[in-house]
Amino acid sequence: KHTHSSEAISLIEGEMFALMFNEQGNLIDKKVLKKEGDFIYRNPQDTYHLFLPITNYIIYREVIGGEFKPGILAEWDYTKTLKEYISQDLKCCNSSCKNPCSFNVVKNRR
């Protein structure tokens, strides 16, 4: 989460999943961003969020107001919530993540 400002994402190429969590780790918002359709997402200041590629690659622009400051990582394990919204087992694909995963979106989940 970013404690100093909100963040806006503008998708340029590909498709991605935008997820927002509350302090307890419960999913409070989700949206699939596509080049043709909904391609902008804003998450408010002080909310945990995660952006996951759906296509093989994504290109997006991230805009955060003010001076850059590193975000805060969640203390809770978000994979439990994510398992409800993905269709395959979690697999490592990114060594910089706390819980690196590869995801497919489960369509029509609410």
Image (spheres, helix red, strand yellow):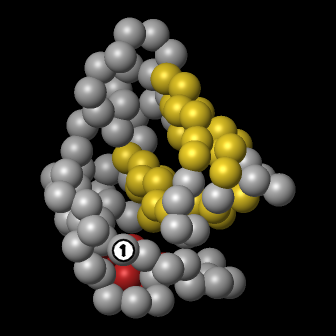
Q: Is residue 30 visible?
A: no
Q: Is residue 107 above or below residue 79?
A: below
- Would you say 110 lies left or right of 80 here? right
Q: Quadrant of the C terminus?
A: bottom right
Residue at figure coordinates x 29%, y 20% from the top left: 69
Q: Position of residue 98 (x, y in %)?
A: 17, 57
Q: Residues within 10 Å of mark 1 (few under 14, many from 20)?
A: some
Residue at figure coordinates x 36%, y 74% from the top left: 102
- Would you say 24 lies left or right of 31 here? left
Among all residues in the image, which is located at the extreme right?
Answer: 37
Q: Quadrant of residue 105?
A: bottom right
**For this rendering, which residue is in front, 19 or 96?**
96
Among all residues in the image, which is located at the extreme front?
Answer: 56
Dot 1 lies on which element? loop
- Would you say 101 lies left or right of 45 here? left
Which residue in the structure is indicated by mark 1?
Answer: 102
Total marks shown come to: 1
Q: Position of residue 64 (x, y in %)?
A: 49, 23
- Would you say 97 lies left or right of 105 here? left
Residue at figure coordinates x 42%, y 49% from the top left: 49
Amino acid bearing label 1 = Ser
Q: Is residue 106 above or below residue 1?
A: below
Q: Position of residue 95 (x, y in %)?
A: 18, 58
Q: Is residue 53 visible?
A: yes
Q: Quadrant of residue 1?
A: top left
Among all residues in the image, which is located at the extreme bottom?
Answer: 88
